[in-house]
Structures are given as C-alpha cells and as structure tokens.
Image (spheres, grey):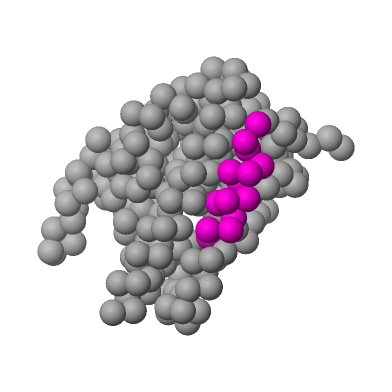
Amino acid sequence: MTDPLQPLVDLPGVRAAADRARDALAEVHRHRTNRRGWPTTAAEAAVRASRSSAAIEGASTEIPADGRVADPVLAGSLRVGQALDGDALRNLVGIWQRAPLQALARLHLLAAADLTDPEQLGRPTSDPDVAERLDILGQIVLGSPAPAPVLAAVVHGELLALAPFGSADGVVARAASRLVTVSSGLDPHSLGVPEVFWLRRRQEYLAAAEGFANGDPDSVGDWVILCCAALEDGAREATSIAESAAE
C-alpha cells in the first residue's frame, strides 16, 4: 500500500531536516553521561518538557517547594511528564504501539484532570469528522514507514488541528509527539526537549500549526521542517542537561 505520508517526505527540505533531527538525537544518546546515567537526565528532560508545554498554553511554570502546583494546566502537564518517564513510559509506549487512540485517551485523562468534568476525561468529541480523522491518524501511526520525525510532526499537527478533547489538547499533542519519538527508537530514552524550542518561538509555532491545519502543501512542509528543527534543538537542550549532570 502507498504510504499517505510519502508526499510529505518528498517535500523540499523535509528529508534533510528529518535526517538532522535523527543524527542530533543519536549523538546525545551517545553522550558519556547518557550511557548509564540516562534515567537521571531523562527525568530532568521530562520536567523541562512539562513546564515548557504548559507555558505554551499560557500557564505558570512555577513548581513550589512543597510540590503543590496550583495552576491546573501545569499540574496536568507534569502528570503527563511523569507518564513519559521511567517505567510509566514503557507502559504507555506499549499501549501506543497497540492502540494509539487509547494512549491519547490516557494522556488526556492525566492532562485535563483539573480542567474538565470527570465524565469528559479521555473522551474525544462526538463529531463524526473528528472521529474519522482520529481513526485515520491511528492507522497511520500503526502503519506508516515514514521517518519518525515526519510522523511525530504529523501526529502533533493533526491533534492540534482537531483539538479532539476540547481541553488540554496542546499538552496532549506535544506528548503524543514524544511518544512517536520514543516508540520509533528515534529518542528511545526520551532525552530530547523540543518543547523548549517551541516555547521560545511560540508565535512562529502557533502560526505554523495553523498553516498545517489549513492543509496547504507548502505550509504543511514548513510545519514538518519546524518540528524537525525542534527535535534537533531539543537534542542540544538534552546535551546541556547531560553536561550539567556530569559536573
């Protein structure tokens, strides 16, 4: 069968951007600190990712000394970060590789626990168009041989465009992108922190996501390349974490 993502891979600049992201993440996994100490650096990466993802939504990034986070968006993002670290990550990756929509429901339950009614947690909208596109997205996740950076960008962009849950959709979309990078072996220990890049370029990020949603080929290509650049930059953030841990 023809891969529906192949036209994206063939867009100008996409494959080269994906290769740069892959090389950068492979290099940080070879860092001397990450050869054995990756659980420590991965935990720090998860916290930085969670805080940055919440900040993109306009939430606070303050984590009080007692750990009692008042901002519901940040609290949800931190819960998602915990699910993307250690043994919890392995469990979630297993679900993602079998039933991606179930994994998305789990992410929403964690992200939106303080934002919506309990009966709405993990339940996407009943809009049939959204349901159809989610089903297609799930099939792509399970079947596309596209380079992992491209697949991560598509999952990320499609979830932002659909906003299937109506709350915490941005946090869920960025977390799903991380799941792609881990489950594909692109970033197996979840060391990268692309969320920092997206936060620093928040307006560019939001504009590019809107372009992806509009479906114009050039805009879709720009989104994928931006996401690949974020993965590459996230590897540099991971290197700084590793260097700090080595001191």
Quadrant of the image containing the N terminus: top right
Residue 92: x percent and y percent? 53, 58
Instruction: Pick the quarter of the image with the C terminus.
Output: bottom left
Q: Which one is nearer the viewer's eye here, 229 or 185?
A: 229
Bounds of the magenta span? 12-25
> Horizontal and vertical percent for residue 246?
34, 79
Answer with left or right where residue 70 lies relative to residue 214: left
Residue shown at the point (16%, 48%) measured from the top left: 70
Q: Residue furthest right?
A: 1
Q: In the image, is residue 92 above or below residue 130?
A: below
Does the rendering let one see residue 101? no
Q: In percent of the image, x 32 and y 59: which residue is there? A: 47
Q: Nearer the viewer, residue 239 or 118?
A: 239
How many numbered marks appear? 0
Residue 211 vertical placement versus 57 (above, below):
above
Q: Nearer the viewer, residue 164 or 20?
A: 20
Residue 32 magenta-highlighted: no
Q: Quadrant of residue 72?
A: top left
Which residue is rendered at x = 78% and y = 37% of the image? 3
Magenta stretch, overall SS: helix
Left or right of 233? Residue 148 is right
Q: Quadrant of residue 188?
A: bottom right
Q: Which residue is situated farthest in the bottom direction here?
A: 36
Residue 57, position in %: x, y?
Answer: 30, 36
Horizontal side of 227 relative to 54 (left or right) equals: right
To which quarter of the image does residue 150 belong? Answer: top right
Left or right: 208, with 158 as reference point: left
Depth check: 123 or 129 in front?
A: 129
Q: Is residue 185 visible?
A: yes
Q: Residue at x 52, y 69 (%)?
A: 29
